[in-house]
């Protein structure tokens, strides 16, 4: 038989080691319900601890994801700012190049303007010289033409007198026709032009002018017509054309074709 001490020790060992015995004892003494509640509380606490750990882990993951997201955003923002800064630098460089290009363009325009002004100045001077020369030439031609016409009238009048015809030679000016050589009497009429050089085309042109005078102003024409051209130089083809058209070709040295009288 166990002593009290041994029995007490045995009971304590069983309470510590044997759960069912412990519950039986607790139930016997009214603590079973408390132990069950404590067990449930412990279970709930364990569940809460597990949930808390899960929440903590989830929070840690969320924090890490947020930190990673912020890191990526910071890197992305950094790249954007770097791109913006590069774009700003490119714009500044572009504006600088444009300013330089505009400067060169304006310098070119200014040089062109000066060149144009210088060109206009030279042209004005050249035009003045040309105008002066033209006026001199016109003056010379007027003097020469007048002198040549006077010479032609004198020579032709002299040659006509040598042929027994006395006609006063002058210039005939009508509204649409001008004739250098013109002279009439009651029966004869002489009509012609004075030129520095006579070619076949000029002979043809003068003949047409004479025919125009005859058709438009017949009152200035007589029954016997003498067509004449006085020139300083007469080409061979002009001689041929003059003979064909019955035109008297005369120079200061004498007549080159025979005088022919055309009956009208």
Image (cartoon, rainbow, N blue to C red):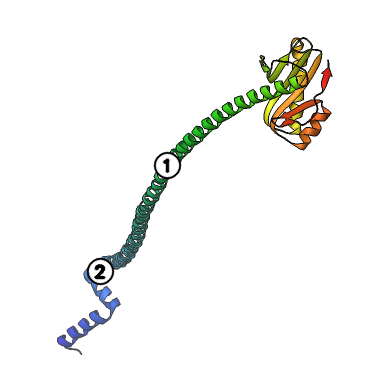
Q: How crowded is mark 2: few (under 14 residues within 10 Å), some or many (20 or more)?
A: some
Q: Where is residue 227 in the image (x, y as percent from the top left)?
A: 77, 22
| Viewer-closest of 39 and 107 | 107
* SS for callout 2: helix
| Residue 139 drawn above or below residue 100 | above
| Viewer-closest of 81 and 230 | 230
* SS for callout 1: helix
| Viewer-closest of 107 and 209 | 209
Q: Where is residue 126 in the image (x, y as percent from the top left)?
A: 48, 38
- Circle on res. 35: 2
> Hey, which quadrant is residue 236 in on the image?
top right
Residue at 15% over, 86% down: 5
The residue that mark 1 highlights is 118
Say left or right for 248 vs 196. right
> Hey, which quadrant is residue 182 in on the image?
top right
Please, which residue is most extreme toward the left here? Answer: 5
| Residue 48 drawn above or below residue 115 | below
Residue at 42% over, 47% down: 108
Q: Where is residue 87 in the image (x, y as percent from the top left)?
A: 37, 55
Residue at 82% over, 25% down: 246
- Circle on res. 247: none
| Viewer-closest of 262 and 116 | 262
Q: Earlier in the sequence, mark 1 or mark 2?
A: 2
Asked if residue 209 can be seen in this view, the reply is no
Q: How far apart are marks 1 and 2 (CA)?
A: 120 Å
Q: Where is residue 134 in the image (x, y as percent from the top left)?
A: 53, 32
Residue at 67% over, 22% down: 154
> Hey, which quadrant is residue 11 in on the image?
bottom left
Q: In which quarter of the image is the C terminus?
A: top right
Q: Residues within 10 Å of mark 1 (few under 14, many from 20)?
A: few
Q: Which of marks 1 and 2 is in front?
A: 1
């Amino acid at each position: 038989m166990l002593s009290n001490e041994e029995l007490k020790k045995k009971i304590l060992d069983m309470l510590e080691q044997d759960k069912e015995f412990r519950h039986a004892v607790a139930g016997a003494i009214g603590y079973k319900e408390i132990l069950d509640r404590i067990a449930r509380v412990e279970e709930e606490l364990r569940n809460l601890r597990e949930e808390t750990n899960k929440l903590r882990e989830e929070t840690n993951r969320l924090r890490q994801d947020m930190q990673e997201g912020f890191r990526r955003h910071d890197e992305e923002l950094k790249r954007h700012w770097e791109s913006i800064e590069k774009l700003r630098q490119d714009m500044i460089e572009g504006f600088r190049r444009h300013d330089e290009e505009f400067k060169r363009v304006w310098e070119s325009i200014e040089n062109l303007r000066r060149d144009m002004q210088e060109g206009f100045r030279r042209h004005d001077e050249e035009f003045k010289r040309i105008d002066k020369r033209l006026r001199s030439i016109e003056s010379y031609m007027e003097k020469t033409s007048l002198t040549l016409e006077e010479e032609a009238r004198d020579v032709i009048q002299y040659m006509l007198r040598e042929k027994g015809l006395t006609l006063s030679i002058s210039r005939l000016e009508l509204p649409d026709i001008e004739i250098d050589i013109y002279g009439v009497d009651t029966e004869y009429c002489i009509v012609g032009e004075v030129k520095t050089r006579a070619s076949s085309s000029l002979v043809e042109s003068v003949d047409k002018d004479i025919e125009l005078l005859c058709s438009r102003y017949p009152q200035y024409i007589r029954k016997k017509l003498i067509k004449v051209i006085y020139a300083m130089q007469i080409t061979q083809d002009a001689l041929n054309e003059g003979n064909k058209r019955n035109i008297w070709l005369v120079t200061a040295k004498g007549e080159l074709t025979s005088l022919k009288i055309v009956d009208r």
